[in-house]
Image: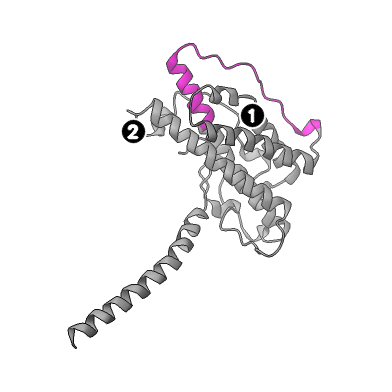
Amino acid sequence: MPLAKLQTLSHVLCSSAGVQLSVLLPVFFCLLDAWPLYSSMGESSEISGDDVQEVNVRAPLTEEQRWHLMARQLHRDVKTLRDEQFDRDFRDAANMTSFEGVRIHTPVLKASDGCLSRNFSTERCLGRVYSVLMWYKEHLSCIERENLTQTLTNDVKHGTKRFLESIYSQVQLKDTQVEEFSRSSLQAKSAWTRKTLVHSILFHFTNVMIDTCRAIHYMSKRKTGDGHQRKDRKKTSDWMSDKN
């Protein structure tokens, strides 16, 4: 084949590949963004319903779908803050696992809170989510003093407030459903305890949001009947609260 024809054919093939790549890459990244989350308690999303959600883009979003979108964005923002603070204050640490023994205990979602498919209760689960997130909202001042990315800190603050208001206004939670956690000031007597305190709050907050996303997604699927098709095979003893 003449050299000129080979060059023309090569140009056509490259152009065609470039067009296909430009079409496929956005789809690929969308799929990556929708990849199932893993729970702070060690359960894959396959169990609790946080797989890729099928949404009719022409239909208006349901209340649960709006909650899910808000929760996923809040999770991303909190996780980014967690990673930023850890990289800044513990740059010599290999990973977060080594800090398991020094983290303080903060409110988390538990197997008994009605957020798993085997014992799911919309009323009980939302009540627990609300009360747990209220604790983190009250302690965001600890994060605001840390000189982390200001816009991201503000996004977490406003995202938490907006999500709580959305749940409260729609579900109309009763006072008896909202468990009160101690809101006593968390004292940091040294620079080290302050750093570990902030890390503990962001670490557990991130895990809470993973489980919140999964619970709300399952709630949406359960409403349409899809949630009953999945079985939760994990035992309560399998729940792990400190998975990275």
Which of the two marks, 1 or 2, is nearer to us in this view? 1
Asked whether 199 or 113 is in front, the reply is 199
Q: Amino acid at mark 2?
A: Ala
Q: Secondary structure at mark 2?
A: loop
Look at the image and give the residue range highlighted in magenta: 175-202
Q: Which numbered circle lies on residue 194? A: none
Residue 159 higher or lower than 181, as above or below: below
Q: Is residue 196 magenta?
A: yes
Q: Residue at the bottom extreme? A: 1
Which residue is labeled 1 in the image?
137
Q: Is residue 172 left or right of residue 50?
A: right
Tell me the CA gap for discs 1 and 2. Answer: 30 Å
Residue 181 higher or lower than 95, as above or below: above
Q: Residue at x 67, y 47 (%)?
A: 67
Residue 53, horizontal then vertical, whole percent? 60, 58
Q: Which numbered circle lies on residue 94? A: 2
Residue 143, horizontal then vertical, whole percent? 54, 25
Q: Is residue 53 left or right of residue 114?
A: left
For the residue carrying disc 1, how many other residues have a C-alpha within 10 Å: few (<14), some (14-19), or many (20+)? Answer: some
> What kind of colouring is applied to the model shown?
one colour
Residue 167 higher or lower than 23, as above or below: above
Residue 87 visible in the shown view: yes
